[in-house]
Structures are given as structure tokens and as C-alpha cells.
Amino acid sequence: MDKYIVRNAVKEDIPAIENIFAAARKFMFSCGNPQWQNGFPDHKFIAEGVCSSSFRVLVCNCEIAAVYSVFDSDEEYDRSGCEWLTGKNAEYLAAHTLAVAEKFRGEGLGRLCVEMAAEEARSRGKSSVRMDTHEKNIPMQKLLASCGFVYCGRLKPIRGEFLCFEKIIG
């Protein structure tokens, strides 16, 4: 595998991030997954995430190969009826909006992003990483299971049927 670096996304990365998400929407649709088909994540969400330093990009040879976002918490997770491994009031890192650029699919970069999110959580003193994905996003469910995440329940249908996962980090 080539050498990759992870860094905070910057304003100049926004067009590449938007292209990655557009390709991800097409891929999800082709797999029968309705996730993100309403245009999410949109330009405003991406720009706000870049400005707040929530977006991370995985870069290979000066090219953005993958993107994901991290947050100190998630209100939907906190309100959910999920049975989190670390309990309701734990300090966790929420990782979201993971997508790999089309030309880099199949190289294990989704796994690398998940591992980097866990490493960031560890370095920030969090007890776990929490993620969710649509019930029809089978590739992401398989990825999370292979990375040691445990199914913890469903989000109430605030934004569709999403399955929640958590991984305790040590």
C-alpha cells in the first residue's frame, strides 16, 4: 500500500470532497442503498465541517483518497435507545461521512480511516468510537464488523433506519 497521510481538511479540499461524496452517492444507489440520495452531505455541511475542523482527508501523492468527519459527540446518539458498550454518558468520538474516492476503492482505505478515527479518539482520551450506517449499507456494516465494532441498536427514524455501532478503544 502506498503511504497515506491524514490531515484536517482545508477550504481548498472542498471540491474534491464534494466529488468523492457525489461518486459515493452513485455507488450507494447502484447497491440499492438510499443513503445520501437526498444530496447529503451538501456543500453547506461540508464547508461548515471544514471550518470547524471536523473533516479529515486521507491523502496519497497529493491526491485526496478518502474523507471522513469526527465529532466529540452526536445528539442523535445521546438521545437514542441504543445499548452503547460504554454506557450512555461515556466520552466517545463520533465518526461520520466516510467515503473513499472511486479510483482508490478496494485498497483498504475505509479500514484505514476507521483506524485513524480510533487513533484520534485514543489520543483525545475517549473511551470509544461510535458510528452508524444505513441498514442497507452492507459494505459499511461489514467494514465495521471487521474492524471490531459491535452493533448497539437502531437510531429512531429521525433520518431513516440507521444501525449504530461502537468500538471500545484501549
Image: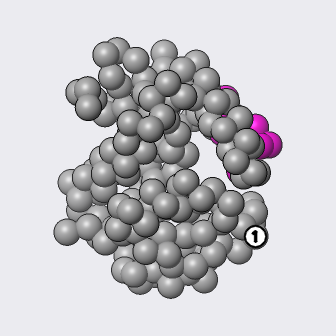
Q: Is residue 25 magenta?
A: no
Residue at 37% across, 49% down: 111
Q: Nearer the viewer, residue 61 or 103?
A: 103
What colour scheme does the image use? Answer: one colour
Residue at 55% across, 45% down: 97
Q: Residues within 10 Å of mark 1 (few under 14, many from 20)?
A: few
Q: Does dot 1 land on a helix, a strand or a loop?
A: loop
In-image side of 22 versus 112 (left or right): right
Quadrant containing the N terminus in the rendered view: top left
Q: Which residues are magenta?
A: 35-43
In-image side of 91 versus 34 (left or right): left
Residue 142 in the image: state x and y as whole percent.
49, 61
Residue 105 in the image: state x and y as whole percent.
48, 34
Q: Quadrant of residue 113?
A: top left
Q: Is residue 145 visible?
A: yes
Residue 120 in the image: state x and y as whole percent.
28, 50
Residue at 43% across, 23% down: 64
Work out whether 82 lies above or below 135.
below
Indicate the amino acid at tag 1: Pro
Q: Quadrant of residue 124?
A: bottom left
Q: Residue furthest right?
A: 38
Q: In the rendered image, which residue does mark 1 sit on? A: 157
In-image side of 126 versus 51 (left or right): left
Quadrant containing the C terminus in the rendered view: bottom left
Q: Main secondary structure of the magenta part?
A: loop
